[in-house]
Amino acid sequence: MALDRRIVELYDEYTHKPLDRRSFMNRLIMLAGSAAAAEAALALLEPNYAQAQQIPPDDARLEATRLAETVNGVALKGYLVAPKAAARRGGVLVIHENRGLNPHIEDVTRRMALAGFTALGLDFLNPLGGTPADPDAARALFAQLKPDDVVAQARAALALLAARPDATGKVGAVGFCWGGGVVNDLAVAAPELTAGVVFYGRSPELSRVPQIKARLLLQHAARDTRLVEGLPAYEAALKAANIRYQAIVYPDVDHAFHNDTSAERYNAAAAKLAWERTVAFLATETGAA
C-alpha cells in the first residue's frame, strides 16, 4: 500500500508538533477517505517493534545491562551494551527519537555494540519518570524537558563512557530525529564530544557553531524539506568556523528512513548505507577497532 504524500506529511506533523490524537485521526480519515483506510495507513506509519528487531536481546556476543547510576550529580538510566570480547573501544551515546528509549532504540544500541563499541541508549525522560510504554504518552512528555537538563544528562553519559576501564577515552554520539537535534546541541556544549552523527535532526543555534570541537556527520532525507531547507545555513556556519563535517542528503527518502519499525518511511537501502557510514565514521573518530 503506497500512501499519499499528504498522509505521510500529516503523520510527521503529528509526531513533531502538539497535535492531539483526535484531531490527527479526524484529518487522517478525511485524507484516507474512510476510517478503515485511515487505520490501514496508520498501521504502515506507526512503530511495530516486534517485526523490526535485528539483534535479539540475548545475543551471546553481547553483554547488556540496565544502567541506573548518578554521574557528576546527574541521575542516569538507560541500556548499556558492550561486546563480550575483550578490547579497548570507543563509547557511543545513542540518543532516541521523541518516543523515548523504546525497543527500537534498544535494538539500535545492540547494533552499535555489535559493531565494536560500548553503546549506551540513555532514557532522557528519566527526570519525568522514564519512558512510558504508550508512544503517544512518551511524545507528550518531551515538551516538559528542559534543554539544559538534556545536555547535562548527555554530558554525564559521555563521562561515564569515557571513564570505563575498556574505553579509548574518546566518545561519540548518534541521534535520530529529536536525538539528532540533541547531538547538535551537545556538539556546541560539550568539547569532550569527539564525533557526532545526526540523523535528520534540527540544527543548533548558529551563533554557537564556532564552539563545536567534534567532527560531525549530518545525514538527512531529501523529502524532509523542513530540515533540508535549513541545512545550507548550518553548513555555511560550519565552514566559516572551520569545523570538520560531512553532510549527506539521501534522495527519494522520507524523514525517519532509518527506522525499520515504520513500514512506510523505512528505506532499507538508504538505511544500510547510512548505518555503514555511521559505523565507519565513529570507528575512525573514537579509536574503535
Image (spheres, rainbow, N blue to C red):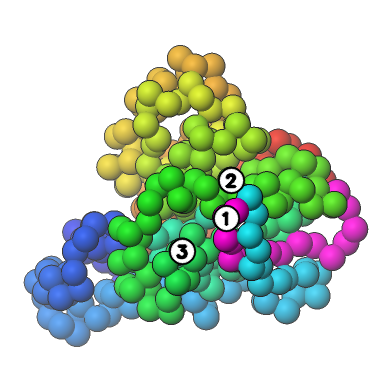
Gap between marks 3 and 2 measured at Cα = 15 Å
Question: Residue placed at 11% from the left, 74% from the top?
Answer: 26
Q: Which residues are magenta?
A: 73-89
Rendered location of residue 270, percent (x, y)? 51, 51
- Pick the front one: 178 or 268: 178
Query: Which amino acid lies under the numbered mark 1 shown in the image of this protein?
Result: Val
Question: Is 197 above or below relative to 191?
Answer: below
Residue 174 visible to the viewer: no
Crowding at mark 2 (Cα within 10 Å: few <14, some 14-19, many 20+): many
Question: Residue placed at 70% from the left, 52% from the top?
Answer: 160
| Quarter location, residue 171 | top right
Residue 74 got which mark?
1
Which residue is under mark 2? 155
Quadrant of the drawing holding the N terminus: bottom left
In the picture, measured across the screen, residue 14 lies left or right of residue 151, that is left
Disc 3 secondary structure class:
helix
Front position among marks 1 and 2: 1
Specify whether residue 82 is painted magenta: yes
Question: Is 27 above or below relative to 274?
Answer: below
Disc 1 secondary structure class:
strand
Query: Which amino acid lies under the numbered mark 2 shown in the image of this protein?
Result: Arg
* Marks 3 and 1 close (CB-CB < 8 Å): no
Q: Looking at the magenta stretch, what is its main secondary structure?
A: strand
Specify whether residue 215 is painted magenta: no
* Marks 3 and 2 close (CB-CB < 8 Å): no
Q: Residue furthest bottom?
A: 36
Question: Residue placed at 81% from the left, 43% from the top?
Answer: 168
Which residue is under mark 3? 127
Crowding at mark 1 (Cα within 10 Å: few <14, some 14-19, many 20+): some
Gap between marks 1 and 2 measured at Cα = 9 Å
In the picture, measured across the screen, residue 110 lies left or right of residue 51, that is right
